[in-house]
Image (cartoon, helix red, strand yellow):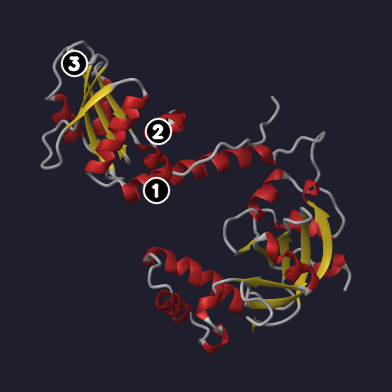
Amino acid sequence: MSTAAAGTDRTLWGVHAEKSADPLFLNVKLIGVGWHEVGDLSELPADRDAFKTRVANTYSQMKPTAVPGNAGQLFRFVHEVKPGDLVAYPAKSDRQVHIGRIEGGYEYRPDRSPDYPHQRAVKWLKSVPRSYFTQGALYELGALLSLFQVSKYHDEYIAALEGKKPDLDEGEDETVAVVAEDVQENTRDFVIRRLAQELKGHPLTEFVAHILQAMGYRTRVSDPGPDAGVDIIAHKDELGFEPPIIKVQVKSTEGNIGGPTVSALYGHVESDEYGLLVSLGGYTAQARSFAQNKANLRLLAGDDLVDLVLEHYDQLDSKYKGLIPLKRVYIPQTIE
């Protein structure tokens, strides 16, 4: 079969594995996924619920919300991947993208590889350097899943298989801006998700106080208990006498905060003080309208809080860095 006969309508799967899998995948000519504890999946009916049950029973410590995603990858590998489908594998050892064709059905072969016992035979058709592709195509292939369907840049990989290079205007990769935006958006989503999952209620108040301390404020945090309207008092001087005094209320809800909540906080704010409401969610139009006319009142939504986290991340306590593990990376920047 010629590469041109591969066809642009052929389903293309992306697969991820550790560097140690490269000899197995490339020399033995197969792809595989882990989850070795679930056993032989050919025993199960072609039913997603059966796969969910197997995963949930095998990994009792797994969060219920994670079960469908893991079970879905296994179901796809066993039942949705078909002989004749294409597969792209970004190997770490040679930094090549290996494109091949699925040749066989599902096999459970822990004897061949205990780390990747769920396997499909592959005929590798072509190896292409990573530099051959646009940044957007590489980003899609860099998905965190072990198995996924390549869709957005499908045609680019097919073109590479047929020996065609992406058509870039004067060498400018227009997908760079998309990649940079996606990386930033994914990071912001991750920060909000971690805060929402791990810091409900008073712990979020303590975190906001810590952010304010990183910004140079001294803070006093109210005791846990019934909401008295003010969760934090922030000030610049050591004793808390010098203005400005900032009275802060913190809401861990991810929904929109309404006008009554905003006006209630403002009722605790004196004319020479400032009010700050911090929420993981957003605010209704009524709430924003109320705050717009108050020079000493500020509303911080979830995105605003993420901005502060990213700006002052280096000053955060190690326990919060452990809660929101981030590392500095460099991403491509478009040339104006």
- Front position in the image: 264 or 145: 145
Q: Earlier in the sequence, mark 1 or mark 2?
A: 1
The crowd level at tag 3 (other Cα within 10 Å; few <14, some 14-19, many 20+) is: few
Q: Residue at x 43, y 69 (%)?
A: 67
Kindly indicate the quadrant of the structure image that contains residue 297: top left
Left or right placement of residue 173 versus residue 208 in this view: right
| Front of the two marks 3 and 1 | 3
x and y percentages locating residue 247 in the rendered image: 20, 24
Question: Circle 3 sits on which residue?
Answer: 239
- The answer to whether residue 291 is above or below residue 170 is above
- Front position in the image: 192 or 207: 207
Q: Residue at x 45, y 45 (%)?
A: 189
Query: Can residue 36 be seen at all in this image of the molecule?
Result: yes
* Disc 2 to disc 3, C-alpha distance: 23 Å
Left or right placement of residue 293 versus residue 17 in this view: left
Specify the amino acid type for callout 2. Answer: Leu
- The answer to whether residue 18 is above or below residue 292 is below
Determine whether label 1 and label 2 are within 8 Å by CB.
no
Q: Earlier in the sequence, mark 2 or mark 3?
A: 3
* Disc 3 to disc 1, C-alpha distance: 35 Å
x and y percentages locating residue 103 in the rendered image: 76, 78
Q: Quadrant of the C terminus?
A: top right
The crowd level at tag 2 (other Cα within 10 Å; few <14, some 14-19, many 20+) is: some
x and y percentages locating residue 145 in the rendered image: 57, 61
Question: Circle 1 sits on which residue?
Answer: 193
Question: Circle 2 sits on which residue?
Answer: 316
